[in-house]
Image (cartoon, rainbow, N blue to C red):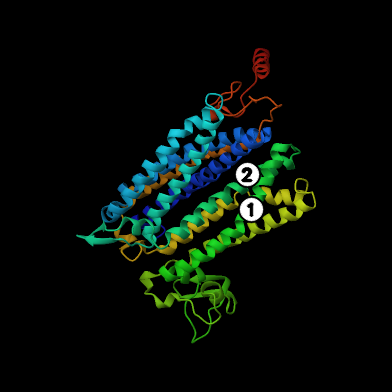
Amino acid sequence: MFGLEALDLARIQFAFTISFHILFPAITIGLASYLAVLEGLWLKTRNDTYRDLYHFWSKIFAVNFGMGVVSGLVMAYQFGTNWSRFSDFAGAVTGPLLTYEVLTAFFLEAGFLGVMLFGWNKVGRGLHFFSTVMVAVGTLISTFWILASNSWMQTPQGFEIVNGQVIPTDWLAIIFNPSFPYRLMHMATAAFIATAFFVGSSAAWHLLRGRDNPAIRTMLSMAMWMALIVAPIQAVIGDFHGLNTLKHQPAKIAAIEGHWENKGDEATPLILFGWPDMKEERTKFAVEIPYLGSLILTHSLDKQVPALKEFPPEDRPNSTIVFWSFRIMVGLGFLMIFTGLWSLWLRKRDSLYTSRPFLHLALWMGPSGLIAILAGWFTTEIGRQPWVVYGLMRTADASSNHSFMQMSITLIMFVVVYFALFGAGLGYMMRLVRKGPKISEGSDTPDGGPGQKRTPARPLSAADVPSDGEHEDNARLTKEV
């Protein structure tokens, strides 16, 4: 069907499930730190706005955290079901790294999550804040181990191969492999930016509908400060990451650039747009800027960038895909920087919360961080092909011996179940966002929020709970009908 084989369906299935999964941890990482900041600001200033925002976003965090855990379990099972040969080859490295993630990060999060969500009126303020901080730290530790494992697959070191299996010889070299620091910083920063635009978009939605209060303004203000400061930093981190990739995975860079061959001693141009054709081995309709490719990738005007024709055809990544996924990521990055700069200009003019064109932009930029993460992840993973462990094991040699029919059935089941389950979860999160933060009237126990006495502490009971008056109206209406 469509010229696909069982291996192609296994890759599509993994790509589909990880595309769902990566969205939830990204928001979890950002929201956990955001909640720690909000509670810390409330403890320091006693400004009720920060407390109201904490209670509001903790509900969304809880739902998102749950969906992230469920989708993550599926990823682990696929290593044994669809990629058993990879597990047999590299399991001595990837298995312990994922185990360390469970022992150090997941247990830490699980130990303090209950106190964070349900202990607001049950433990002291210091202990509750400590629990929130520990959950935030746990999400970052989880990121550390997951990225260590994935980065080792990109730039493997610290091992030897015995009887066709990878045997660890230096765990520090395995963990702190050449691409790990750059990928860790890049992913963690992307999670913070994605969360900032998610929060900012929520605030813009309420402001555009006339709901203007201190909590909504604080949401937008904090989100735009994050965009202004962190988005340019992310661009710098991305530049260092690109230089590291050029050194260790030059074929990936050549595919990203759609660069097929060098001409004499000429500097490498930057191809802004075009259509890389893998069969014809050229980039059609290329729009080029002379010298700029060499300047960006080698920081010089005369050095050349490796070209795709320097690598055997069977070792080349799919340039058509990574060329455009990379440009989507970078294009959204520039839009994020522009949004942050515009917010600063409006802030100086005292119109940040009233400029409707800006609020519309902030609203539409809500999913931009998550889309950029997906585009960057596609660039990284497809750019590694045809290797599952770069230079050591090909993807074609890593899959289990399943038939095309088996992979087709499981892929269809995954698509149906994921859209039904996580679609419902995302829809519920959006209901919470539309409801907005509940503003307290100076009481130390405001309505709403986990652990509060006057509303359910369970996150799944937080949206659209009818009041006693609404119950009476519904009963009266039912009787009349």
Residue 199, disc: 2
Q: Position of residue 379 (x, y in %)?
A: 48, 61
* Residue on which the image places disc 1: 227
Question: Is residue 18 shown above or below 64?
Answer: below
Q: Report the amino acid beneath label 2.
A: Val
User: Is 286 positioned to the left or the right of 417 in the image?
Assistant: right
Does the rendering let one see residue 82? no
Q: Report the amino acid beneath label 1.
A: Ala
> Residue at the spot x=33%, y=48% of the render?
406
Q: Position of residue 165 (x, y in %)?
A: 24, 58
**Quadrant location of the C terminus in the rendered image:** top right
> Residue at the spot x=78%, y=46% of the render?
354
Q: Which one is in front, 179 or 82? A: 179
Q: Which one is in front, 455 or 320? A: 455
Q: Which one is in front, 77 or 121? A: 121
Residues packed near mark 1 inside 10 Å, few (<14), some (14 to 19) or many (20 plus):
many
**Quadrant location of the N terminus in the rendered image:** bottom left
